[in-house]
Image: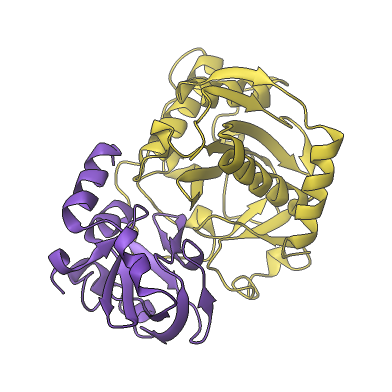
Amino acid sequence: MDPATLKFSKSHEWLHLDGEIATVGITDFAVEALTDLVFVDLPEVGRTLDAGEIFGEVESVKAVSDLYAPVAGEVTEVNTGLPDDLDALGEDPFGRGWMIRVAVTDASAADALLDETAYREHCQSAGH
Amino acid sequence: MVTPSSTCRIVETGTAHPGRWNMACDEWLLNMALQSGQPTVRVYAWSRPTVSLGYFQKPDALDSNPHVAGLDHVRRLSGGGAIVHHHEWTYSCVVPAGDPNAAPGTDLYDVVHRSVIDQLATLAGGPIAGLGLREIADGTDKPALCFARSAAEDVVCGKHKVLGSAQRRRRGAVLQHGSLLLRSSSHAPEFVGLEDLVPELVLPEDFPELMARTIAMSLGWQLAHKPISNVELQEIAQQTDLQPGT
């Protein structure tokens, strides 16, 4: 997916909205900062998420980090192959590295997220 | 996000507690940092030999290891391999969100580990031969036990790993804890500790306090001692009830 078409959270998740279905993953910046990912744990299909709620966890360099839902909704699909193909996160974070698909509660909530330009600025200004 | 404080609270340093309490206290300190921006450091021991599993390790990860049979076990919030906590000092430091030390990457390991190396050199009256950050890491092999693993962030003495750390990152804050191995344990006889390797090094009784102060100052924090209050102990007790393990 073209990052220019995506929305971003300040906690480094990306979101692609197709109607009422949002595809969610973590950004190339996050993957690079995490380095050497060894585990990812994703939610079950059917789980409902609030915006900002933890939906999964990743481990890298002995650091476990939480993943946060950028919008509220119900998980409709999980990239079940990702835990066994973590290279996908580094090689194609906006494509093969997708994590979950969510039937969003309110699609307009995505408007509050950052566009790519604002997200890149956030990464720089936050000293990341 | 709350404004991070630059004054570090040093808590429960030099004391020994059961494993579940230790893990509950560290998680409680992380949650406190998220609520109040308070950095903390504690250096502690374990009231009996205990295995802590890395967050993603399976409960049966050490089932084939006869040396740890029957020991208490807990699950850490942090990643990495299992640790047999016996003859060691364990540290935890919590960096609040917004503190520069919480930036992504491995700098926090580096800063804390260098500070411990320097502290030990001060106590020894000069650099300790062979003690330093690992120069060449082989991260491809992942044995179950942390001290059998090799990472660039480790502190080694010669070829022996004596200090390893791991992290939990939550909403911009970081809990980092690590184990400084002092002596070999009958529950993990394959590993030797700092006092085995450097017998002339005698750590003073107040070493945990020195270590806590050194870590806090290396992170640019001022120091404040504030014991855990009775109300806080109750909160930790509630957290303890939620901890997996025995």
The colour one sees for chain B in the rendered image is: yellow
Q: Position of residue A124 (x, y in %)?
A: 22, 41
- Picture quadrant where residue B41 is located: top right
Q: Is residue A68 above or below residue B106?
A: below
Q: Is residue B142 above or below residue B179?
A: below
Is residue B93 at least partly visible in the picture? yes
Residue closer to the observer: B6 or B48: B6
Q: Is residue B38 above or below residue B239?
A: above
Q: Can you name the residue that lies furthest to the top here?
A: B125
Q: Position of residue B226 (x, y in %)?
A: 73, 23
Which residue: 71% across, 51% down?
B24
Which quadrant would the C terminus of chain B be assigned to in this image?
Answer: bottom right
Question: Horizontally, is A101 left or right of B50 in the view?
Answer: left
- Picture quadrant where residue B130 is located: top left
The colour one sees for chain A in the rendered image is: purple
Which residue: 16% across, 65% down?
A3
Q: Position of residue B156 (x, y in %)?
A: 44, 40
Which residue: 74% across, 32% down?
B12
Q: How is the image coloured?
A: by chain
- Picture quadrant where residue B133 is located: top left
Question: Horizontally, is B66 left or right of A111 in the view?
Answer: right
Residue closer to the observer: A71 or B191: A71
Question: Horizontally, is B93 left or right of B137 in the view?
Answer: right
Residue closer to the observer: A71 or A56: A71
Question: Horizontally, is B80 left or right of A3 in the view?
Answer: right
Q: Position of residue A16 (x, y in %)?
A: 26, 73
Which residue: 54% across, 35% down?
B197
Is residue B131 at least partly visible in the picture? no
Tell how many labels: 0
